[in-house]
């Protein structure tokens, strides 16, 4: 009998990242409601992450860099070590984010020491966040969101090859900028990239617009044999692929990641609220809960469907 659950999987955890590792564990991290550090938990089943013990493995500094708004951590296992990618600002400039990396050589990332590898330096010292990595044909790639001070908008998506898990090398290419109506409500945003490789294609999901009920997901696609550092290799879907469903009381779904069930079924991981009206700045509303649901494929790529109701069984 298959395990079942209903959403939310984990309450008050935004920007969720879940990965299934070769050691048989599912690992989870996300933004904390007070943005003060990086939580980790693990479980042998996706369905019991809800009850798994959580450990804050790194806390923000008191002053200077990495002292405010620790956002959207991701856990990756690269070249036999663990890496946490995250964005952080300073207590004197809480929205001037840069991207940083932590390294841990322990087999279990909830143990051992997390070493600060420093800032990931990009083409410009400007607002940058939401980094992810993936390997393809023996090369390590880095995808992230960053503001270009010379053009209108809050953040665009970029891709670069990596010399090592904390250093970029070669060209840094802008592959998406917010220009469609549904990406530019409240803010002009392309952020939160997540990578899927399947059927000869590489897909990058991302999120757009302000972080209220307008927040939604888009999709980029490239042929796996193309030059991924060439902007012309990437095509943006003209419509959002996952968005608010008022009938299901799911508002602002986005900042997603991907994992699988033990039988290989694909799972979309995302955050959303179950109410529309927010008092004050949506960033300070703590109720972007981690949610999961399975998805399918057709000839055009992944089919995410609509956000399911909180009381509806995921399986």
Image (cartoon, rainbow, N blue to C red):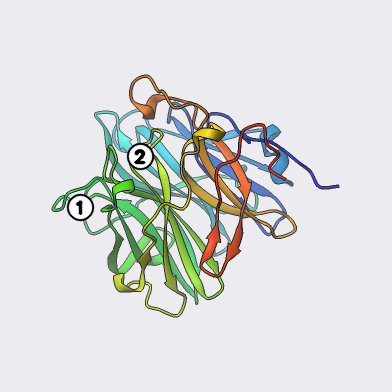
Callout 2: SS: strand
Q: Residue at x 66, y 48 (%)?
A: 26
Q: Nearer the viewer, residue 280 or 170?
A: 280
How crowded pointer 1 is (Cα within 10 Å; few <14, some 14-19, many 20+) is rated as some
Decide if residue 309 is in sight here: yes
Q: Is residue 146 left or right of residue 293?
A: left
Can you tell which mark lies on residue 198?
none
Tell which tag, 1 or 2, sits nearer the viewer: 1
Q: Are marks 1 and 2 in contact (CB under 8 Å)?
A: no
Image position of 105 with respect to 270: above or below: below
Residue farthest toward the left in the current orientation of the protein: 150
Q: Furthest-front residue in view?
A: 247
Specify whether 143 is left or right of 27: left
- Specify few, some or many for label 2: CA neighbours under 10 Å numbering under 14, 14-19, or 20 or more: many
Residue shown at 27%/57% (left/top)? 122
Residue 37: % across, % down: 46, 33
Q: Position of residue 273 (x, y in %)?
A: 50, 31
Circle 1 sits in a helix, a strand or a loop, which is it? loop
- Which residue is label 2 attached to? 88
Residue 162 image position (x, y, % from top left) = 39, 66
Q: Which disc is residue 148 wearing? A: 1
Q: Residue at x 30, y 73 (%)?
A: 232
List x then y, in percent, for residue 123.
Answer: 23, 59
> Foreground residue, 278 or 66?
278
106 lies above or below 71? below
Q: Looking at the figure, which quarter contains the C terminus?
A: top right
């Amino acid at each position: 009998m298959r395990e079942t659950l209903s959403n939310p999987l984990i309450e008050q955890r935004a920007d969720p990242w879940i990965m299934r590792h070769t050691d048989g564990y599912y690992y989870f991290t996300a933004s904390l409601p007070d943005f003060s550090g990086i939580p980790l938990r693990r479980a042998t089943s996706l369905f019991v992450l809800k009850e798994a013990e959580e450990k804050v493995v790194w806390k923000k500094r008191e002053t200077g860099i990495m002292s405010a708004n620790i956002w959207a951590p991701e856990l990756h296992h690269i070249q036999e070590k663990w890496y946490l990618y995250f964005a952080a600002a300073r207590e004197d400039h809480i929205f001037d984010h840069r991207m940083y990396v932590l390294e841990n050589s322990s087999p279990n990332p909830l143990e051992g020491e997390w070493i600060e590898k420093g800032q990931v330096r990009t083409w410009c010292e400007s607002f940058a966040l939401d980094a992810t990595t993936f390997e393809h044909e023996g090369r390590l790639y880095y995808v992230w969101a960053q503001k270009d001070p010379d053009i209108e908008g809050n953040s665009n998506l970029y891709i670069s090859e990596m010399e090592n898990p904390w250093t970029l090398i070669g060209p840094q290419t802008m592959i998406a900028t917010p220009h469609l109506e549904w990406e530019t409500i409240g803010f002009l945003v392309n952020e939160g990239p997540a990578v899927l490789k399947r059927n000869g294609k590489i897909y990058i999901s991302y999120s757009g617009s302000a972080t209220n009920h307008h927040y939604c997901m888009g999709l980029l696609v490239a042929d796996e044999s193309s030059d991924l550092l060439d902007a012309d290799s990437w095509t943006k879907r003209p419509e959002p692929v996952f968005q608010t469903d008022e009938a299901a009381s799911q508002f602002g779904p986005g900042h997603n990641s991907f994992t699988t069930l033990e039988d290989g079924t694909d799972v979309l991981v995302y955050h959303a609220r179950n109410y529309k009206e927010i008092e004050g700045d949506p960033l300070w509303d703590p109720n972007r809960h981690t949610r999961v649901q399975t998805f399918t494929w057709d000839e055009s790529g992944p089919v995410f469907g609509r956000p399911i109701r909180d009381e509806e069984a995921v399986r």
